[in-house]
Amino acid sequence: MFLFLPQGVVLRQSQEPKEVWGYVQVRSKAHMFWWLYYANHPTKDFTELPLILWLQGGPGASGCGFGNFEEIGPLDKEMKPRNTTWLQAASILFVDNPVGTGFSYVDDCSLFAKNLTTVVSDMMVFLGEFFRCRTEFQTVPFYIFSESYGGKMAAGIALELHEAVQKGTIKCNFMGTALGDSWISPLDSVLSWGPYLYSTSLLDDNGLAEVTAVAKEIMDAINKNQYGLATELWGKAEGVIEENTDNVNFYNIMTKEVPEMKSNEQENLHLIGLYQRHVKNMHKDSLNELMNGPIRKKLKIIPDCVKWGGQSRDVFENMAEDFMKPVIYIVDQLLAANVNVTVYNGQLDLIVDTMGQEAWIRKLKWPNLDQFSQQRWKALYVSPESTETAAFHKAYENFAFFWILKAGHMVNNILLGVPSDQGEMALKMVRMVTQQQH
């Protein structure tokens, strides 16, 4: 079932983007919500600009909510225009996935995705329906951009989509994927936490020893394929880091986390802590009120029984066994298939720090890795007039890396009021990745 309603089309003024939204039933009793904004360029039609699918992390964080109103959509959560919206460079398709995220929902609790395979197959159903119904986008260059756990999903979706396009089962002009602060190799991230925090004076020798010890526990669990245990130990490791750093913020080391009250529930406390830190954090009161209030009224199609974010914890917990599994091999397959792959990372991110990203990249079996590594990176500036280095960039054939300076986990977002927003640099990167700018 594909749902397009007349009230889903909004075109108020020429300056404001046209938008449509709806649901796709990706499996029986599993409903995926999407929200599309057409590009908003002063001189170009949307058909002259690419289409970007945005995938949020978590798993369980909402692209239609957080990605849209906190990061790259046309309006912020105060409903004010965003100067650095990506709509200046592309049309944006937000999708609440996996099912149960945001306004997406399942009618039966057994239907939550438990692994990447299900996440990918659901998205293939969605994309097949989307491009079948929105034929105007079939020839537009299509890119998948992602953040955090969304990057792991993006890698799997990109490979499956590439194969579907080759077979002719989905008609679209797929051009590549961009993995932002992405959870591609959880172990490489975990092993780099201690050295990164130590090098930035956020751990002393004793703290480094404690973080290193719990990282080794995680490594042992992963080496024994005990992925559920590894996820629990990951929660323990974050607790050790918080104790030793006075609650450093995992999304931006320049600030600190305000500790949550401890849960009284007799459940896995580490898993609850992980959910609160990495998913519930993206359902703050102001955004929650916006999505379940004015936005819900505007959309008009959200079922009465569905609350935005109401099933997000279920989404996160059902994916716990899959969470720590690496997908470096999928990136290798993408590169071998000649799919364009971009990695971008914020300098101040801890949860997926740049050291960890570089570590898994060194493990790629891609034949051109040596040539990529030998390239000298180039400094990037937000404008010709700027003298401040905003990022570094390196590329070889179909692989590229952006080191975004003064940015945290959300490259396009001011996190907790810290003035590290690199929205202009993020927009420049989008134009470079989509071949609108060199």
Image (spheres, rainbow, N blue to C red):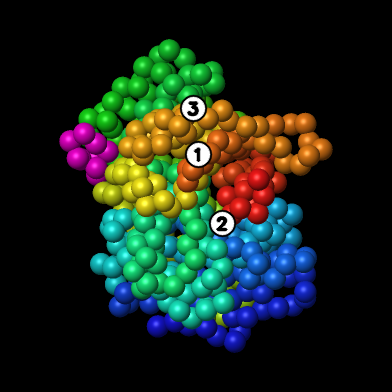
Expressed as whole percent of the image width and height from the top left, the position of residue 191 reads 36, 28
Residue at coordinates 19% horizontally, 40% vertically from top-left? 225
Please tell me whether mark 3 sits on a helix, a strand or a loop: helix
Q: Looking at numbered disc 1 in the image, what kind of residue is underneath it? A: Tyr
* Overall secondary structure of the magenta section: helix
Residue 387 is at least partly visible in this image: yes
Q: Which residues are magenta?
A: 222-230
Front in this rendered view, residue 436 or 133: 436
Labels 1, 2: front one: 1
Question: What residue is pinned by disc 3?
Answer: 374
Number of labels in the image equals 3
Q: In the image, is residue 1 above or below residue 438? A: below
Q: In the image, is residue 76 above or below residue 203? A: below
Question: What residue is pinned by disc 2?
Answer: 67
Cα distance in 3D space between marks 2 and 3: 35 Å
Q: Residue furthest bottom?
A: 6
Cα distance in 3D space between marks 1 and 2: 29 Å
Instruction: Count residues near mark 3 (Cα–Cα under 10 Å), then give few for <14, some for 14-19, many for 20+.
Output: few
Quadrant housing the C terminus: top right
Mark 3 or mark 1, which has the lower sequence index? Answer: 3
The image's mark for residue 218 is: none
396 lies left or right of 100: right
Residue 257 is at least partly visible in this image: no
Expressed as whole percent of the image width and height from the top left, the position of residue 112 reads 31, 64
Quadrant housing the N terminus: bottom left
Residue at coordinates 62% horizontally, 32% vertically from top-left? 378
Residue at coordinates 59% horizontally, 36% vertically from top-left? 393
The image's mark for residue 396 is: 1
Expressed as whole percent of the image width and height from the top left, the position of residue 372 reads 47, 34
